[in-house]
Image (tube, rainbow, N blue to C red):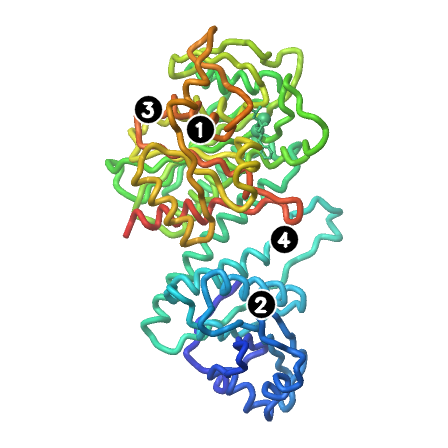
Amino acid sequence: MNIKITNKDLKASNFQCAIIGIYEDHSLSSSAKQLDKATSGHVKDILQRDIFSAKAGECLFLASLPKLKNESAIIVGCGKKNELTAKVFRQIITAVSKALKQYKISNAHCYLTELGVKDCDSHWQVRQLVGIIEHHRYEINAQRKATSKKKSSNTTLTLYSDDTKTSKQAKQAIREAQAIANGENLSRDLGNLPSNICTPSYMAKIAKQVAKKYPNVTCQVLSESEMRKLGMNVLLAVSQGAKEEAKLVVIKYNGASKSKAPYVLAGKGVTFDTGGISLKSNAGMQEMKYDMCGAATALGSIQAAAELELPLNVYAVLACSENMPGDNAVKPTDVITSMSGQTVEILNTDAEGRLVVSDALTYCERFKPELVIDLGTYTGACMVALGSYVSGLMTNDEELATELTNAGNYTWDRVWRLPLWEEYDKELDSEFADMKNIAGRWGGAIIAGCFLSRFAKNFRWAHLDMAGPSANSKGGATGRPVPLLTQFLINQVR
Ligand code: BES
Ligand code: MN
Ligand code: ZN
């Protein structure tokens, strides 16, 4: 989407479709007044006819306007003026996004920058506005006959900002929102592809393409034999039942001097999770094509950081594998020696995310990282605990907990903390090895966090279980938590 900023108000603009907000008390903003005047009182007319109550998010599309031949307008309800919170603003923008799509509007002038949002600055407002509209514009890259492929039209959105200081702020906000949206879309595309296309090798190929696009991004792909030499046996145990070769994708964005310690993301990239020998039941197995979304969002976040030219070093290690049953597959009770030297008794081959990422975390030690954040669709238990609106956050670093929580709240890509207490960790002790990969029935999300904490002793570390927000049956992959991670990185610069 093409986004412009204008300081011309509505009456001075040549607009195709104006987006205007109206409060429940029917008081008119200055652009609403101008639209009303230009249409000989059409706006007030509508408000008097009681067909539009201006409840937050209520939308009215006016395909034609008196006196204005070629123009149209979207009037959106903004609720009560003193109740316009961040949540309500997002509701309003979501409604507008849907209307823009429904009525195929390709050129809109948006005056919602005029609205004052409680406790939110104009930077946040523009970020949300652009972010939400971009999010809804995304279309799934469906595998259809070439001739029927839809080409999405080029859309221009013009934002109104009357003074130069805020318009300079708005420019930066637009830049950030678009970089994040592009990162989300990259990861959504990967997530939405079927697992016969989006294999570990395909993930590696796309990561290499990202590296090609940016001068200071490099990508290295480790094969199974290279991983074997490094002793990444736990990761390889997950892939040994699969014909597809596992890949460890190491992608580095160097936006700062090489001496600066990097921020490292370690992503779970299970391109399909059948459960392995601990085979899943049929119900819901199709959701497991999204089991590489941790890796995909790590890649999307790297791309966003590169696009924003953040003065940081940000690396991502993507642990990519298929989890398949087979005559060569790892079996429950097998004991495997990890790259860290610790041994793991695999009691459930379906708890494979923690396995692939454990060796990836050990691999991260070589970077002497500033910190490491691992992320993946680790447990159904996290969804049972928190639902699908939020990622589970686990860390023993209080400062990191606060920073991730703040970045999540700012972007509305939120996290909720779960504890990593010793009582839970003890449950992983095994009679036959240093640890087992599952524990009892309860607190499964925390158990996965505790398992990975055993491989993250040598750096500051956080664990994100994004099983909930990563995808949904309606729109497929969401691109979350790209906004959270990118914001976290942006905040490291300030
Ligand atoms: N990929 C799944 C977790 C998952 C489930 C993500 C549903 C998204 C939606 C993970 O690999 C898994 O199978 N976890 C098991 C762990 C258990 C065996 C300890 C689970 O959650 O049941
Ligand atoms: Mn699994
Ligand atoms: Zn999985």
Crowd around label 1: few <14 · some 14–19 · many ≥20 (10 Å): many
CB under 8 Å between callouts 3 and 2? no
* Mark 3–mark 1 distance (CA, rounded to whole Å): 13 Å
Could you tell me the amino acid type at mark 3? Lys
Pair 4/1: label in front: 1
Pair 3/2: label in front: 2
Could you tell me the amino acid type at mark 4? Glu
Question: Which is more toward the observer, 486 or 248?
Answer: 486
Could you tell me the amino acid type at mark 2? Gly
Residue at 52% x, 59% y is 132
Question: Which is more toward the observer, 298 or 309?
Answer: 298
Residue 213 percent coordinates (x, y):
45, 45
* Mark 3–mark 2 distance (CA, rounded to whole Å): 47 Å
Question: Which is more toward the observer, 172 or 382?
Answer: 382
Query: Which type of secondary structure does the marked residue at label 1 adopt?
Result: helix
CB under 8 Å between callouts 3 and 4? no
Pair 4/2: label in front: 2
First reached walking from the N terminus: tag 3 or tag 1: 1
Pair 3/4: label in front: 3
Q: Is residue 163 visible?
A: yes
Disc 4 designates what residue? 139
Could you tell me the amino acid type at mark 1? Gly
Disc 3 designates what residue? 457
Query: Which type of secondary structure does the marked residue at label 3 adopt?
Result: loop
Crowd around label 2: few <14 · some 14–19 · many ≥20 (10 Å): many
On screen, residue 146 versus residue 360, left or right, reads right
Query: Which type of secondary structure does the marked residue at label 2 adopt?
Result: loop
* Furthest residue toward bottom: 40
Tag of residue 25: none
